[in-house]
Image: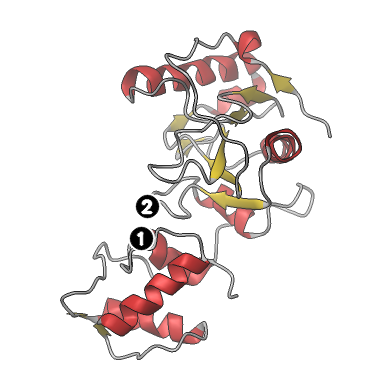
């Protein structure tokens, strides 16, 4: 296994404010992006990558109040993997209640500027995942931050790559995921019984996936129970409510 690891000392990381919680094994890794503007100039200037990683740590510690940067590892366009919280340490970036299930790996792309991961970023993310599996007890799953948490992270290009099975680069450009009905913003839940075309659309897709569900436009106890079972199967929070993450998973997760 090859990895171009940049240690905390090498990139000038601040010391954590407290002790990490131990993480001995996980289901796998969740992939993230910054969600902000990333200058395309980092592709040709590694010093800018170092400065960006430092700024992310500062934001997490001084803005979020976390003890350290929230990611386990961070990957730049030069196929270098920055040590964040590192091996066997609980991350903070996956969301409350979700950090013990997966390590967190950030690719240095954003929602504007540099939005599409370079081949070296994809290689670096896979290098990081192999490292976490080999040394940190990471499981086989490769998920996006949005899997189980209501967020746009890790952005459409990175998430499309994940949904394709996270292949090593060389098979062509990563494209956007297949389009599907957008989440309306209305969370479907019971009680009371909710009705509408968004309910019917979700029920129809669940029926198409093979679930035993009435497509009647009424979100009642039957729909709630199907939703709960689906969420459990897809490693989503089991709430029985169709939020954004569950809605997207209804079209984007593989049928099993």
Q: Is residue 62 above or below residue 211?
A: above
Judging depth in this view, the residue of 237 and 80 nearest the camera is 237
Label 2: element kind: loop
| Residue in the image at 48% along x and 55% along y | 147
Which is nearer the N-term, disc 2 or disc 1? 2
Quick check: marks 2 and 1 in contact, CB under 8 Å? Answer: yes
Alpha-carbon span between mark 2 and mark 1 = 6 Å
Q: Relative to the observer, which residue lies in front, 174 or 213? A: 213
Task: Report whether residue 179 is seen.
Answer: no
x and y percentages locating residue 219 in the rendered image? 26, 80
- Relative to 217, is 91 above or below? above
Which quadrant is home to the C terminus?
bottom right
Q: What label does residue 72 carry, if any?
A: none
Query: Badge 1 is on which residue?
Result: 244
- Count of picture labels: 2
Q: Quadrant of residue 105?
A: top right
Q: Quadrant of residue 63?
A: top left
Residue sitting at 39 percent across and 63 percent down? 238
Q: Residue at x 61, y 26 (%)?
A: 86
Q: Which residue matches tag 2?
A: 150
Few, some or many C-alpha atoms within 10 Å of disc 2 (few <14, some 14-19, many ≥20)? some
Residue 138 location in percent, x, y?
66, 43
Q: Is residue 68 left or right of residue 162?
A: left
Extreme residue in the right direction: 1
Residue 154 position, x and y percent, is: 50, 45
> On screen, 194 above or below 137?
below
Residue closer to the observer: 132 or 215:
132
């Amino acid at each position: 296994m090859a990895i171009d690891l940049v240690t905390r000392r090498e990139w000038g990381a601040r010391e954590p404010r407290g002790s990490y919680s131990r993480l001995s094994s996980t289901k796998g890794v969740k992939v993230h992006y910054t969600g902000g503007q990333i200058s395309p100039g980092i592709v040709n200037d590694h010093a800018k990558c170092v400065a960006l990683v430092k700024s992310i740590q500062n934001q997490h510690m001084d803005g979020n109040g976390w003890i350290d940067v929230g990611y386990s590892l961070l990957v730049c366009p030069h196929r270098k993997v920055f040590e964040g919280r590192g091996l066997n340490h609980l991350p903070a970036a996956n969301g409350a209640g979700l950090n013990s299930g997966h390590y967190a790996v950030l690719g240095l792309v954003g929602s504007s500027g540099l939005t599409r991961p370079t081949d070296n970023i994809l290689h670096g993310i896979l290098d990081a995942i192999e490292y976490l599996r080999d040394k940190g007890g990471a499981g086989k799953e490769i998920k996006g931050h949005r899997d189980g948490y209501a967020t746009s992270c890790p952005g459409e290009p990175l998430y499309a790559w994940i949904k394709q099975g996270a292949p090593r680069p060389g098979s062509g450009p990563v494209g956007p995921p297949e389009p599907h009905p957008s989440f309306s913003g209305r969370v479907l839940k019971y009680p009371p019984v909710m009705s509408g075309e968004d309910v019917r659309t979700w029920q129809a897709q669940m029926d198409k996936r093979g679930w035993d569900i009435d497509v009647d436009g009424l979100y009642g106890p039957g729909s709630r129970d199907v939703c709960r079972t689906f969420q459990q199967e897809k490693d989503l929070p089991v709430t029985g409510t169709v939020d954004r993450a569950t809605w997207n998973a209804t079209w984007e997760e593989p049928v099993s």
